[in-house]
Amino acid sequence: MFQALRYENDGKICVLQGPISDPRSKHNEEIHHVENNLVLPRNCPVICHGLVSASHLNGEIGAARGNVKHDGTGFRLAVHFDKKSLKSALVRPANLRIVFELPSEE
């Protein structure tokens, strides 16, 4: 497992720190720059983007939980949305971005 720190290059690169050991030892971890399409954002807040058939979910924030499904077209992550009116959905990692700063609730 790795800790996502930020995006670079307009979201094309995800900067990660790790691998994370148990117990955690930060002096053994390194910084990695990874193409975003290779990152599976699990157990963290995400926002949907670029969805065509479920475009109503674009811009919606949710949690990518540990459930990963694989079908003939690739991996999909179970996303449970903050808005109670939205049902959870299986979303390709390419259509997700990690939310590093959650908007304040007003």
Image (tube, grey):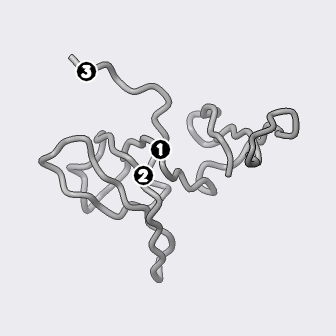
Q: Position of residue 10 (x, y in %)?
A: 57, 34
Q: Residue at x 62, y 39 (%)?
A: 4
Q: Position of residue 63 (x, y in %)?
A: 38, 47
Decide: marks 3, 2 in contact (CB < 8 A)? Answer: no
Disc 3 is placed on an element classified as: loop
Quick one: label 1 or label 3, which is nearer the N terminus? 1
Q: Is 58 displayed left or right of 87 in the figure?
A: right
Q: What residue type is disc 1 on?
A: Cys
Q: Which residue is mark 1?
A: 44
Decide: marks 2, 1 in contact (CB < 8 A)? Answer: yes
Q: What residue type is disc 2 on?
A: Ala
Q: Residue at x 28, y 41 (%)?
A: 60
Q: Residue at x 50, y 69 (%)?
A: 75
Q: Which residue is mark 2?
A: 64
Q: What residue type is disc 3 on?
A: Glu
- Mark 2–mark 1 distance (CA, rounded to whole Å): 6 Å
Q: Residues within 10 Å of mark 2 (few under 14, many from 20)?
A: many
Tell me, for residue 105, which label it has, or none.
3
Q: Residue at x 30, y 52 (%)?
A: 80
- Mark 3–mark 2 distance (CA, rounded to whole Å): 20 Å
